[in-house]
Amino acid sequence: EAQVTQNPRYLITVTGKKLTVTCSQNMNHEYMSWYRQDPGLGLRQIYYSMNVEVTDKGDVPEGYKVSRKEKRNFPLILESPSPNQTSLYFCASSEGGEQFFGPGTRLTVL
Amino acid sequence: GIQVEQSPPDLILQEGANSTLRCNFSDSVNNLQWFHQNPWGQLINLFYIPSGTKQNGRLSATTVATERYSLLYISSSQTTDSGVYFCAVWYVGNQFYFGTGTSLTVIP
């Protein structure tokens, strides 16, 4: 089944404790991206990657890191999470401009 | 960046009613998608529609790229249609931008 997977689905952590949210797709898509969704602000793109070893900042990259060492994986790294990064996070992969989303990760930073 | 605005922001319908949701964008785009975010938070692909008209069951969509808008039609609405509907565009620089969303509530 073609899909985008994310882990964990839910995470509660404390300020400053490094964390990684994994994202994997099995559709051989070159384009992958991360979004955060906040009430009243909609979905905003954090980072995106056009291909392996190529990443670019989206609209809200501050406080996040990404890497793309393999085509199928695109992890999101929060080196020192803060409460303002509490949000719902989505990973997506895309082919020809059509996006497919993962199930989301609900992150709470205390 | 590009501005993507949706209307109406909120919509309450009686089951069985029809509705039209609108997505306006401020510049030319490479493509456009419609999504439904269900009450559990999942984003479900509805249409990939850079231009023209597509239909899928009770839902259809039309994009007029030259006039920078897209419409999503929902006919004979059901309670399972409730949720938030987003349009998203692929813009220059290979970034995606989401609209502000329309929150739909269908009442039995």
Image: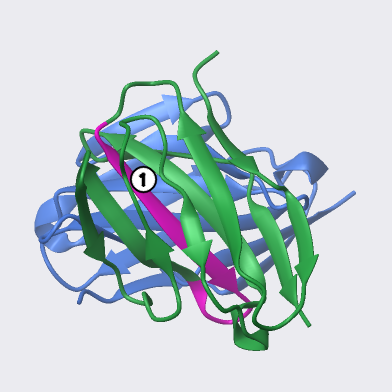
Secondary-structure class at tag 1 = strand
**In the image, residue B95 lies at what x, y percent?**
23, 59
Q: Can the viewer see residue B6? A: yes
- Name the colour assigned to chain A in the rendering: green
The answer to whether residue A38 is left or right of residue A69 is right
**In the image, residue A105 lies at what x, y percent?**
66, 54
Q: Nearer the viewer, residue A20 or B28?
A: A20
The region drawn magenta spans A30-42
Q: Is residue B21 magenta?
A: no
The answer to whether residue A22 is left or right of residue B100 is right
Chain ID for blue: B
Q: Nearer the viewer, residue B89 or B7?
A: B89
**In the image, residue A93 lies at what x, y percent?**
38, 38
**In the image, residue A53 lies at what x, y percent?**
20, 45
Residue at the spot of label 1: B33
Above-or-below relation of B59 to B43: above
Q: Can the viewer see residue B98? A: no
Please tell me which residue is depicted at 70% across the width and 83% down the height of the picture: A15
Helix, strand or loop for the magenta stretch, by majority: strand
Q: Nearer the viewer, residue B9 or A98?
A: A98
**Which quadrant of the rendered structure holds the N terminus of chain B?**
bottom left
Q: Is residue A41 magenta?
A: yes
Please tell me which residue is depicted at 52% across the width and 80% down the height of the picture: A41
Please tell me which residue is depicted at 51% across the width and 41% down the height of the picture: A23
User: Image quadrant of residue A14?
Assistant: bottom right
The answer to whether residue A48 is left or right of residue A65 is left
User: Image quadrant of residue A68?
Assistant: top left
Residue type at mark 1 is Gln
Above-or-below relation of B15 to A60: above
Within 10 angstroms of label 1, few (less than 14), some, or many (20 or more) residues? many
